Image (tube, helix red, strand yellow):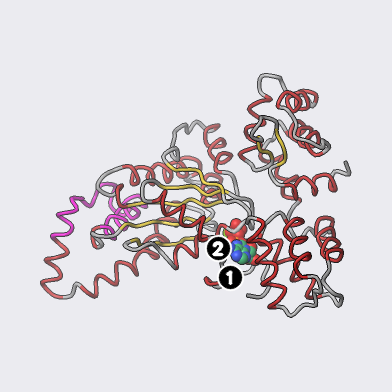
Amino acid sequence: MLPNPGGLLAIEHIRYRDGFIDGLWKVLKLRSVRIESERRGGKTSVLRRMKAKPLENWLAVYQDVSQVQTPTEFADRLVRDLKPVRGFWNKTLNGLAGAFQLLSSFKAFGFEFGFSRAGSWKAKTENIIRHVLARQPNRKLVLLFDELPTMIKNIADKKPEGPKGAMEILDLLQTLRKTDPVGHRLRMVFAGSVGLHHVLRALQAEGHVNQSVNDMDPVPLPPLGKADTTSLARELIVNSGLNAPDLATVCDTIASTTGGFPFFVHSVVDRMGKEDRPVTPATVAEVVRQFLTDPLDPWNLNWFLSRIDSYYPEEGPAVRAVLDRLATSDSPVPLADLVAAAVGAGMTPDRAPSLIGWLALDHYVTQTLDGPYDFQFPILRRWWRLKRTL
Ligand SMILES: Nc1ncnc2c1ncn2[C@@H]1O[C@H](COP(=O)(O)OP(=O)(O)O)[C@@H](O)[C@H]1O
Ligand SMILES: [Mg+2]
């Protein structure tokens, strides 16, 4: 594999995630899951590899729904992408015998068409899923929805369906997951870099209160561990034919300065390949610093700052104060100190603790085992300090 930051990787180049993926399949045998990580954390790569190598007796169907703007579009795309699955069985079911088999499998499956208004997006969605399951009586179906929170937000923001349509999709999908006989052979993965909790909060503000994803396990996609990051860096450097006299130390430096995000590792090696100088720990450290301070922001880190005002329209000053407090401390910070920072920025003391909880959901902070809080990712902490000149 060659450095390919942000590119569409060949399936065999999606590396170091098989342990994570095995864990996902284990959960999927029982329940559906939500994967949340920051942009370019590797979600799409994980889903594409799951699709290419599903567990035995599973059908995995991948859909990038980030561009979907209406419930009808959602249903139409699902039908389009599930049709090939159905088509394969159509071919095998030619003739009377096939028709009989099909009929009995429908009956055995025990569903009825026309559950929702015929021709509606709900009926289309239900029917295609029921259809596929009926024709594949020995398999489970997992729908891998990439960037689903973005789709829900798009639909909620758009007339005529608006928040009602967005909520109805979530409700319908949950009903399908929870209702026998479909439910026990249907699983879903929602992946997204926009926190679904924010999208749901906005829908709640419009009066749509329900628990439409509480049956799904939240599964964070972590950065790579040290050994895997080092190994990825080594592979990329060697394959690029770079001159790295002390390869082991260089790879360690890449691992520690990129925090294990494979996208950053690809970026750093890619940039080193464009420069006419040997790869050393010092040149790597310099390149990482350039990425962190580049005004063009190739790593999209400004998003961590700019999204605060849209995610937290009223609490922006408090969020920045909390993160400033964390960024300037040499050790993890007790909750009481973070609350004090938020209160100092104008927040009422009763609401401040829940704000810290939200910041954890947004991957800014994490609670250490013995209680105090820290930035979840050291690279983010470093960037925050540079950006805010702290
Ligand atoms: N498992 C992996 N092995 C190697 N590189 C990876 C892996 N996952 C992600 N990458 C790198 O990170 C980039 C972004 O990954 P992607 O899966 O598109 O993230 P996301 O969907 O979370 O935005 C890829 O283009 C690639 O450069
Ligand atoms: Mg993606």
Q: Amino acid at mark 1?
A: Leu
Q: Which residue is mark 1?
A: 9
Which quadrant would residue 299 be assigned to in this image? bottom right
Secondary structure found at label 2? helix
Q: Residues within 10 Å of mark 2 (few under 14, many from 20)?
A: many
Residue at 44% from the left image edge and 43% from the top image edge: 216
Beta carbon of the mark 2 residue lies under 8 A of ligand 1:
yes
Q: Is residue 356 left or right of residue 248?
A: left
Q: Pick the residue in front: 233 or 272.
A: 233
Q: Residue at x 27, y 58 (%)?
A: 133
Quadrant where the C terminus is found in the figure: top right
- Pointer 2 and pointer 1: residues touching (CB < 8 Å)? yes
In this view, 194 is above or below 138: above
Residue visible at 66% across and 23% down in the picture: 351
Q: Which residues are magenta?
A: 104-133
Determine the quadrant in which ligand 2 lies.
bottom right
* Percent of width and height locating residue 83: 34, 66
Q: The N terminus is located in which quarter?
A: bottom right
